[in-house]
Amino acid sequence: MKLLDVVSLAVAVAFAAPAALFGIETIAAGDPTGWVFLGFAAGILAFERYLTLPTDVPILAAQRVTDAVVEEPDDENQ
């Protein structure tokens, strides 16, 4: 996983976590509408993971250029 992917996931979790916690508290209080908030939180995470937006294209291009320029170190000790 690339650094920009991790940052993007962290932002999505920061938005999804309050909705998920509210959903859990609502369900624990006996109100089934908490499932809506849990679904909303899951939707935020799925949206971030599986959907490519036009604003993501420069990030993807930068990752490809970085992968082409930077070589991964070998695992062998020399």
Image (spheres, grey):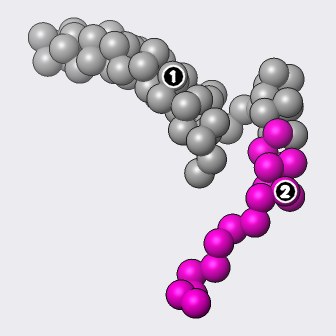
Q: Nearer the viewer, mark 2 or mark 1?
A: 2
Q: Secondary structure at mark 1?
A: helix
Give the image location of residue 34, x and y in percent: 30, 14
Residue 49: % across, % down? 62, 37
Work out whether residue 58 can be spotted: yes
Q: Which residue lies most toward the front here?
A: 78
Find residue 14 and report its horizontal and vertical position in percent. Answer: 42, 19
Specify the amino acid type for callout 1.
Val
Residue corresponding to mark 1? 11
Q: Which residues are magenta?
A: 62-78
Quadrant assignment for the C terminus: bottom right
Callout 2 secondary element: helix
4 sits left or right of 34 in the view = right
Q: Residue at x 85, y 30 (%)?
A: 58
Residue 69, which numbered label? 2
Kind of residue at disc 2? Val
- Circle 1 packing at 10 Å, graded few (<14), some (14-19), many (20+), is few
